[in-house]
Image: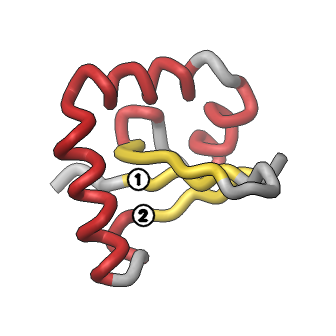
Amino acid sequence: QSVNIVDISELPQATQTQVNQVIAKRGDAGLQKLRSSIDATPQLKSALEAKGLTSAQVVAASMTTNGALTLVTKKAS
């Protein structure tokens, strides 16, 4: 399985809006659950670390039908 990591700022504006809506619906508890799952998966954790990131910067995740996982990150402002 492949892991892609993109910052929300790199996404098209319409996609950023969709991601922000998902984040708002999920709330803090959902975000903590997502981040805990990432921390419990060594492959994901090391993919983030390779880019100098941690699960704390992940705001969303999406899996394609072929098993490619995309983690959307957001730098602290």
The quarter of the picture where residue 13 lies is: bottom left
Q: Measured along the vertical axis of the image, is residue 60 above or below residue 5?
A: above
Describe the element under mark 2 as helix, strand or loop.
Answer: strand
Residue nearest the observer in this picture, 62 or 37: 62
Q: Residue drawn 32% across and 59% down?
A: 19
Disc 1: CA contacts within 10 A as few (<14), some (14-19) or many (>=20): many
Image coordinates of residue 55 in percent, x first then y, are 45, 33
Residue 18 located left or right of residue 3 = left
Residue 28 located left or right of residue 44 = left
Residue type at mark 2 is: Asp
Q: Measured along the vertical axis of the image, is residue 65 above or below residue 32?
A: below
Residue type at mark 1 is: Thr
Q: Measured along the vertical axis of the image, is residue 59 above or below residue 12?
A: above
Dot placed on the residue nearer the N-terminal end, 1 or 2: 2
Describe the element under mark 1 as helix, strand or loop.
Answer: strand
- Mark-to-mark CA distance, 1 and 2: 5 Å
Residue nearest the observer in this picture, 27 or 3: 27
Image coordinates of residue 70 in percent, x first then y, are 59, 55
**Label 1: which residue?**
73
Image coordinates of residue 4 in percent, x first then y, are 65, 58
Disc 2: CA contacts within 10 A as few (<14), some (14-19) or many (>=20): some
Circles 1 and 2, Cβ within 8 Å, touching? The answer is yes
Q: Residue drawn 67% across and 44% down?
A: 47
**Label 2: which residue?**
7
Image coordinates of residue 12 in percent, x first then y, are 38, 83
